[in-house]
Amino acid sequence: MRIVLFSLFGYEIYSHGVFLVLGIVVSGFIMYRLMNKEKLDTTKFLSNIIISVILGIIASRIVFYFMNLYLYDSLYQMLEIWQGGLVSFAGFVFGALVFIVLLKKQKTEMEPVINLAGITFPLGIAIGRIGCALNGEVGVKTKSALAYYGFMPVTAFEIFICSGIFAINFLIYLKFRDKLSKYFLLFSFVILYSLSRIIIDSWRIDPKVFIGLNYSQITSILIFIIALFLYLKNQINFPSSPRERS
């Protein structure tokens, strides 16, 4: 466990924040390059990403604070984000909604941009989760063969899964980019990621709130069902209509 990554001029630099920023920078850079390859407008890309990420982090922190009020003594502690404590799904969903709203407001063609996010977003999550792992975020205590020092390494599982989703979607994009249906890569990411969270979050140290499920699993199930429904609906409406390219 390495909560403090290093010290700089007397200030402690936390691993959680470093890898969160690194994930945003790396995934954002790759998405920027892919957008240029697709000849998409990137003039407001940086500002859109920054606004979406900041508001997403704020949302994830607020949700975590109110879900865990028993851990805090004052409202001020909600601002201590460097201490850890984010509800990732809240941040992902809210940040994505902000990004979509910005694209619509700017009258940008959304489908190709959002589809590319299906490639880069899982990579950003994987890198960001390295900071969580260094903070000692593990799951339940167990004697399972999958255990690491007696605990289920749920964060490590998520890192490997998201890295795999990135690799799969990137290869699909490289080989079949002219044949993919609308939003295919986005649906691929959301469906695979939410399905994996349903499984691995069962090993997290979170209270069970409904039929043996925690809040994260319930959210994952809802997202999985919605994403699968929208994907199937999209396939029915556009069974053989890949995006036209210039």
Image: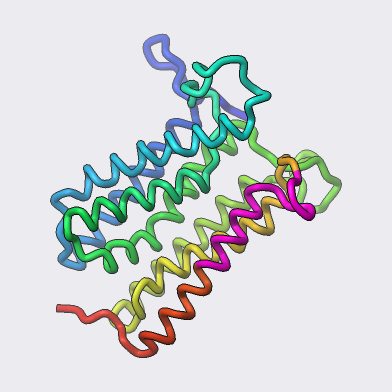
| Whole-percent x, y for residue 207 in the image | 74, 41
- Seen from the viewer's position, the closer of residues 62 and 164 is 62
Q: Residue at x 29, y 68 (%)?
A: 111
Q: Residue at x 58, y 27 (%)?
A: 2
| Whole-percent x, y for residue 161 in the image | 57, 58
| Whole-percent x, y for residue 138 in the image | 68, 39
Q: Main secondary structure of the magenta part?
A: helix
Left or right: 111 in relation to 235: left
- The quadrant of the rendering that contains the C terminus is bottom left
Q: Tell me the magenta residue range.
A: 208-226
Q: Is residue 182 above or below residue 24?
A: below
How is the protein colored in the picture?
rainbow
Question: Quadrant of residue 173 in the image?
Answer: bottom left
Left or right: 245 in relation to 83: left
- The quadrant of the rendering that contains the N terminus is top right
Left or right: 185 in relation to 129: left
Left or right: 190 in relation to 111: right
Q: Residue at x 35, y 80 (%)?
A: 180
Q: Is residue 34 above or below residue 28?
A: below
Q: Residue at x 34, y 76 (%)?
A: 182
Q: Is residue 10 magenta?
A: no
Q: Is residue 39 above or below residue 57?
A: below
Most extreme residue toward the top is 10
Q: Is residue 225 above or below residue 238?
A: above
| Whole-percent x, y for residue 78 in the image | 51, 23
